[in-house]
Image (tube, helix red, strand yellow):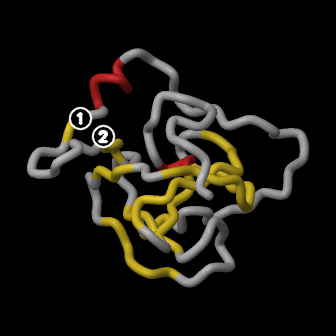
């Protein structure tokens, strides 16, 4: 598959209002502690088969700052509402901050939840 824009299709469909990310219990197993830091960070897997654009803000109009390779895992520092997009885990306006100035659409991250799994960004 090609590079998935973390918000490749802003569908504009108003009848799809909630993300449909998987909520199965195995998602909890996917979140693992990252060794080597004072406070271990939980990481979440990017959808299999996708290279995801990381953007400078919560929407597809923001600059691409890097591309995550296949089979990546990301920490979620905080989350915020932004542009509504569709991805392999549904449609949502939630964007995950993976580092300062770096956002990916939550629809490409397997968090096991349709809502926030981290504190809102300030």
Tell me whether the residue at label 2 lies in contact with that at label 1, contact meaning CB atoms closer than 8 angstroms: yes
Location of residue 30 by image quarter: top left
Q: Residue at (11%, 45%) from the top-left corner?
A: 35
The quarter of the picture where the N terminus appears is bottom left
**Can see residue 48?**
yes
Q: In which quarter of the image is the C terminus?
A: bottom right
Residue lying farthest to the top in this orientation: 25
Q: Farthest right residue?
A: 14
Q: Position of residue 23 (x, y in %)?
A: 51, 22
Per the image, label 1 sits on a secondary structure element best described as: strand
Residue wearing tag 1: 32
Q: Earlier in the sequence, mark 2 or mark 1?
A: 1
Q: Which residue is drawn at 57% across and 50% down?
A: 79
| Residue indicated by mark 2 | 42
Q: Residue at x 74, y 35 (%)?
A: 18
Q: How many neighbours does mark 1 have within 10 angstroms: few (below 14), some (14-19), or many (20 or more)? A: some
């Amino acid at each position: 598959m090609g590079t998935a824009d973390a918000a490749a299709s802003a569908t504009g469909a108003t009848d799809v209002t909630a993300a449909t990310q998987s909520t199965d219990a195995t998602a909890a197993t996917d979140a693992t502690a990252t060794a080597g830091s004072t406070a271990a960070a939980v990481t979440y897997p990017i959808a299999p088969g996708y290279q995801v654009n990381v953007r400078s803000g919560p929407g597809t109009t923001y600059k691409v700052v890097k591309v995550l390779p296949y089979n990546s895992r990301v920490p979620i520092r905080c989350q915020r509402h932004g542009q509504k997009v569709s991805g392999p885990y549904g449609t949502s306006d939630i964007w995950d901050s993976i580092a300062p100035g770096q956002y990916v659409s939550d629809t490409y991250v397997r968090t096991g939840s349709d809502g926030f799994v981290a504190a809102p960004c300030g």
